[in-house]
Amino acid sequence: MLKQIKGLHHVTSLASSAPDNNAFFTNTLGLRRVKKTVNFDAPDVYHLYYGDEVGTPGSVMTYFPFPNAARGKRGVGEVGVTYFSIPRGSASAWAERLATFDVNGITQDIRFGQSRVLFDGPDGERFALVELDDDRAPWTGGGVSTDMGIRGFQGADMRIADGGATSELLQFMGYEVFDTQDNVTRFIVPDGNAANVIDIETLPNAPAAASSAGSVHHIAFAVENRARQLEVREALLDTGYQVTPVIDRDYFHAIYFRTPAGVLFEIATNEPGFDRDEDTAHLGEALKLPSRHAHLRETLEATLVPLP
């Protein structure tokens, strides 16, 4: 069993509009845009990162907004719900706030004894705000007060037709079974960061998901550094998984592999971080380009839709 993985690093999804996506996360949810860059493989598309003040691993939601992309279809073989942490007692205030922004799909429930507000993002993606004791400092943009600000991720829900193989994988990655409620089994990584929860929701009769706008592209797990990442890569290869070589993503190093259920997993390093090319006071303001796309700056600045 691996000990290097410390919980979530980031979650990356697809969107259909960069301005709508940016407004939702910075205004409605009050997160900070910590990086404005482009997709390594499609530089005419933004890659936007939202999180806390510095983009701490375990707080960062990222998006590839492909203009006018069709909406994805929900189903099994995907991350179904991404969970953010909010202070205890703030769920009702969040439900009221989301309603004032005309957010769709607002409901409230309790899972594993924790009060939650569930709602849809601009492309129908599903989120939950979960009341927790969490001492992480929030970013309070968009008029969100400190006493209700988002602290970062709690975790995510994966919808799977048969959870057996994925359960085994998570336990190999260092997660432990916490509890089961109806068709949902919760896994928690001990001694990890605060984004330490993965729920497996077993839906044997559901259709397969079709990925597009509103779909999670991949879910990334955090390791401290490249040495720990290489240890994880070797262990996964030894277990029979097809794992990519290490890829430099400028703000972290990444490896990827596909789970038995079809969900794309990434293992990402906590280093070097989002302040490697911008000081903390100005994170996410300027368009930052990967070195291989630096020659496209003039074209990209003229063609990418402006963001505030």
Image: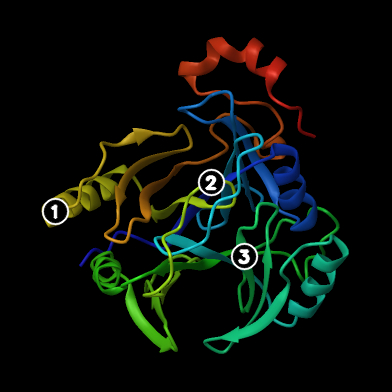
Foreground of the two, 108 or 235: 108
Dot 2 lies on which element? loop
Colouring rule applied to residues = rainbow
Inspect the image, locate mark 2, and give the three-letter code of the amino acid beneath it.
Ser
- Which numbered disc covers residue 127? 3
Residue positioned 32% across, 77% down in the render: 176
Foreground of the two, 16 or 224: 16
Q: Position of residue 273 (x, y in %)?
A: 50, 41
Q: Counting residues from the N terminus, which is met first, the one under dot 2 or under dot 1?
A: 2
Q: How many marks?
A: 3
The 10 Å Cα crowd at callout 2, few under 14, some 14 to 19, many 20 or more, is: many
Dot 1 lies on which element? loop
Question: What residue is disc 2 on?
Answer: 212
Q: CA distance from mark 1 to mark 3?
A: 33 Å
Residue 87, quarter of picture: bottom right
Q: Counting residues from the N terminus, which is met first, the one under dot 1 or under dot 3?
A: 3
Vertical relation: 123 (above or below) 152: above
Dot 3 lies on which element? strand
The 10 Å Cα crowd at callout 1, few under 14, some 14 to 19, many 20 or more, is: few
Q: Position of residue 17 (x, y in %)?
A: 69, 39
The 10 Å Cα crowd at callout 3, few under 14, some 14 to 19, many 20 or more, is: many
Q: CA distance from mark 2 to mark 3?
A: 17 Å
- Which numbered disc covers residue 240? 1
CB atoms of marks 2 and 3 within 8 Å? no
Q: Position of residue 88 (x, y in %)?
A: 69, 81
Quadrant in the picture for the N terminus = bottom left
CB atoms of marks 1 and 3 within 8 Å? no
Residue positioned 78% across, 66% down in the render: 146
Q: Is residue 20 left or right of residue 60?
A: right
Residue 260, quarter of picture: bottom left
